[in-house]
């Protein structure tokens, strides 16, 4: 009998990826046979960085983790998980507000996933708990230094793209 792979999806917009995101993936990687970092594409949402750019950054950051793949999807996350045969979703928690929101979403995904999709939560290290993509974008817009909040692998490219977008 063939062993079923433990596959997890870590969905997000990653606009841009932060060191908080990379911390969660590094924590989760040893627990799963495969982790799919999945950019959810929502036509109603305005992104700062292009899908192609975000995919490239994710691939660059996780190139040394052989069990990590980078993909994108449209539609429901639970449907994408089903298509990828993922039994788990990985989510990071920075604070109590994150937990309240993510708990509800995990229950909805469990139902949408027909009882076959569990959410695994990782609690952020204290030094990363204040970091979010939204905060990083605001710092960029204000002309601040975001290098303490983003992975080293994308630092130069992100700042170049940010300068082009925001004319810093």
Image (cartoon, helix red, strand yellow):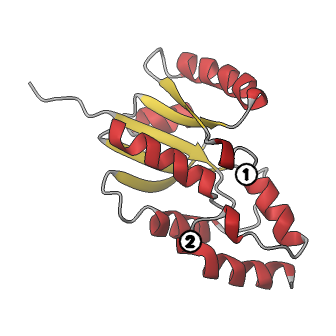
Query: Residue 37 has which mark?
Result: none
Residue indicated by mark 2: 152
- Residue at 38% in and 45% down: 29
Find numbered disc 1 in the image and state the secondary structure of the residue it sits on. Answer: loop
Q: Position of residue 137 (x, y in %)?
A: 80, 63
Viewport quadrant of the N terminus: top left
Label 1, on which residue? 131
Viewer-side residue, 136 vs 58: 136
Image coordinates of residue 167 in percent, x first then y, are: 86, 85
Q: Nearer the viewer, residue 151 or 46?
A: 151
Q: Find the residue positioned furthest to the left.
A: 1
**Residue displayed at 45% across by 56% down:** 70
Quadrant location of the C terminus in the rendered image: bottom right
Q: Is residue 11 left or right of residue 142?
A: left
Residue drawn at x 29%, y 40% is 33
Label 1 neighbourhood size at 10 Å, few (<14), some (14-19), many (20+)? some
Tell me if 126 is positioned left or right of 116 in this view. Answer: right
Q: Earlier in the sequence, mark 2 or mark 1?
A: 1
Residue 73: in sight, yes or no? Answer: yes
21, 84: nearer the viewer? 21
- Contact flag, marks 2 and 1 (Cβ < 8 Å): no
In this picture, is 58 found above or below 89?
Answer: below
């Amino acid at each position: 009998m063939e062993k079923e792979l433990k596959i997890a999806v870590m969905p997000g917009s990653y606009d841009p990826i932060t060191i908080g995101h990379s911390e969660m993936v590094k924590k989760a990687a040893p627990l799963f046979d495969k982790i799919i970092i999945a950019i959810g594409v929502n036509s109603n949402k305005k992104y700062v960085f292009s899908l192609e750019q975000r995919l490239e950054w994710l691939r660059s950051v996780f190139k040394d983790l052989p069990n990590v793949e980078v993909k994108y999807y449209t539609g429901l996350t639970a449907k994408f998980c089903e298509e990828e045969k993922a039994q788990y979703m990985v989510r990071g928690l920075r604070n109590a507000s994150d937990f309240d929101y993510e708990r509800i979403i995990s229950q909805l995904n469990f139902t949408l996933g027909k009882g076959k999709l569990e959410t695994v939560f990782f609690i952020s290290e204290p030094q990363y708990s204040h970091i979010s993509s939204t905060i990083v974008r605001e710092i960029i817009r204000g002309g601040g230094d975001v290098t303490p909040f983003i992975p080293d692998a994308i630092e130069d490219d992100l700042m170049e793209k940010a300068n082009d977008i925001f004319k810093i």
